Amino acid sequence: MAERELALVLHDIAPETWEDYRPFVEAVDALGSIPMTWLVVPDFHHRSATFEDPALQSILESRLARGDELALHGYYHCDDAPPPRTPREWFMRRIYTYEGEFYSLDRQQAQQRLEAGIELFHQRNWPLHGFVAPAWLLSSGARDALRDLPLSYTSDPQHLYRLPDFSAIRAPSLVWSARSRWRRGMSLVVNETARWRHRHQPLLRLGLHPVDMRHQMSRRYWLDTLRRLLDAGYMPTTKADWLKRQAGSGNDEYASVHGRS
Ligand SMILES: [Zn+2]
């Protein structure tokens, strides 16, 4: 079987979520040298500012030094736009998620927030390649803004997209919905099915959220799944490193024909 890789991705990194992740990260580190991609939120819900927290910044800097990737994940993460006006908007912004920060921004608003986030990374000299929208939701204005910024990729649950042209590369994710007991039960089945269905994909992403860390069932699932994938020969990588290695490999071309599902 061709080489398969996995990307362990920690969503919603901010001072207030670090305590949820800490024991998990320690457990992963104990397995060996496993690079992770940290999705950093500059000011989570306007109340937890990563770039004003020296302790978290020094943790993130030590992660960079060991080969991890830091990516930009929204600015505030929550959706502060005026109330939804149409049924579809209402569904997307109140039922599907409250976290679609970039779902209703126009181009100028999106650009301002993206530039503010990029500037914070630059001030710390943190290399930045990727932007991941909260809840993976991008307005068309936000898509346009992304074409003009010094970023090399964005993503949704099934694809990575190279910027500025949004060329799609298939890279499915396992993701939990750990908010309630029934969602956790469903997630176990859905994710095990997805892991099997995507077993021939060259890159499998594991998308972790802070709430997953608060429930034993989901926390254990992630650690067990990571161990199982490593035992099955998956090589751990960051998203940015994987993308760099794909350039010219032919996978991009494949995705442009078959990637949309
Ligand atoms: Zn998020």
Image (tube, rainbow, N blue to C red):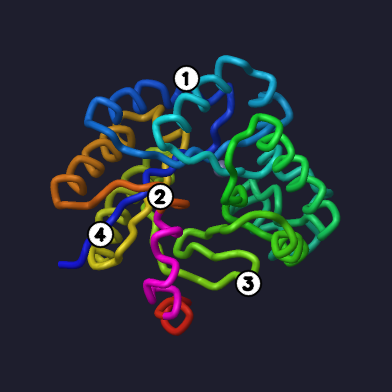
Which of the numbered marks, if any, corresponds to residue 4? 4
Q: Is residue 58 above or below residue 194?
A: above
**Residue occupied by mark 2:** 175
Which residue type does callout 2 highlight?
Answer: Val
- Decide: few, some or many residues near mark 1? Use Cα within 10 Å; few <14, some 14-19, many ≥20: few
Indicate the quadrant where residue 28 lies.
top left
- Nearer to us of marks 3 and 1 is 3
> How far is disc 3 from disc 2 in space, using C-alphas?
26 Å
Residue 145: x, y in percent? Answer: 76, 60
For label 1, being within 8 Å of ligand 1 is answered no
Q: Earlier in the sequence, mark 4 or mark 1?
A: 4
Contact between labelled residues 1 and 3, with CB atoms less than 8 Å apart: no
Contact between labelled residues 3 and 4, with CB atoms less than 8 Å apart: no
**Residue occupied by mark 1:** 19
Which of the numbered marks, if any, corresponds to residue 165? 3
> How far is disc 2 from disc 1 in space, using C-alphas?
20 Å
Indicate the quadrant where residue 58 lies.
top right
> How far is disc 3 from disc 1 in space, using C-alphas?
37 Å
